[in-house]
Amino acid sequence: MTLERMVLLSGAMGAGKTLVASLLEADHGFRRLSTSGYLRAYGQGFGPTGERLQLQDLGDRLDIETDYRWVVDEVALPAFSSFPMGQRWLLDAARKPQQVAHFRATLGDAVYHIHLTAPEAVLRKRYEQRLTSQDTPYTTAVAHPNEVAARGLEGIADVVIDTSTVTLERAVHQIVLLGRC
């Protein structure tokens, strides 16, 4: 394996994790790890209604059953094995401090944790702009323990970027320029 960098993105819903991940993937050669893809396959049969909450609940169950290691052991390591030439990887939704700790323990200095943030009013507006009739209302979604935990990862991140003050392209540029990617 030739792993050079493992970027963990964390932050609140609407902070820009998915878009930043897409730009890192498209413009900088990162390969994305998909926890939601793994959870969908693991919990086959989830439909669009309530899917976010079902996936969160399944992830919570796996966190307890695996001591938070499932993201490393069942998602990351198999992906690395299936594409051993991949040097740059990213996880676009680190949700728990224990997950970050397991990545650091397993991959050491290759791990780089970026936390994306924005003021609450901006996060709410972004969420509501993409809200569909099947989505969880914002007040319910932000109260979920996974969302609360994800927002708390700011304190253990290597870098925090406020996506309300920079474009997503600039945020990606900052991540790449930090000299570690």
Image (tube, grey):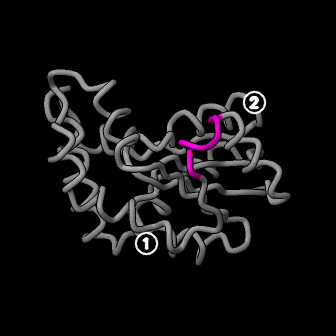
Q: Residues within 10 Å of mark 1 (few under 14, many from 20)?
A: some
Q: Secondary structure at mark 1?
A: helix
Could you tell me which secondary element the residue under label 2 belongs to?
helix
Name the quadrant of the N terminus.
bottom right
- Say above or below: 137 vs 159: above
Residues at circles 2 and 1 in contact by the CB criterion of under 8 Å: no
Indicate the position of residue 33 as horizontal and vertical percent values: 53, 45
Q: Amino acid at mark 1?
A: Pro
Q: Is residue 1 visible?
A: no
Residue at 20% x, 56% y is 144
Residue 88 in the image: state x and y as whole percent: 73, 48
117 sits left or right of 43 in the view: right
The numbered dot on residue 27 is: 2
To which quarter of the image does residue 178 belong? bottom right
Residue flagged by tag 2: what amino acid is it?
Asp
Magenta stretch: helix, strand or loop mostly: loop
Comparing 13 with 84, the one in front is 13
Q: Is residue 57 left or right of residue 95?
A: left
Q: Disc 2 to disc 1, how far (Cα)?
A: 28 Å
In the rendered image, which quarter is residue 158 located in?
bottom right
The magenta-colored residue range is 162-168
Picture coordinates of residue 91, whole percent (x, y): 54, 50
Which quadrant holds residue 159?
bottom right
**Residue that numbered label 1 is attached to:** 97
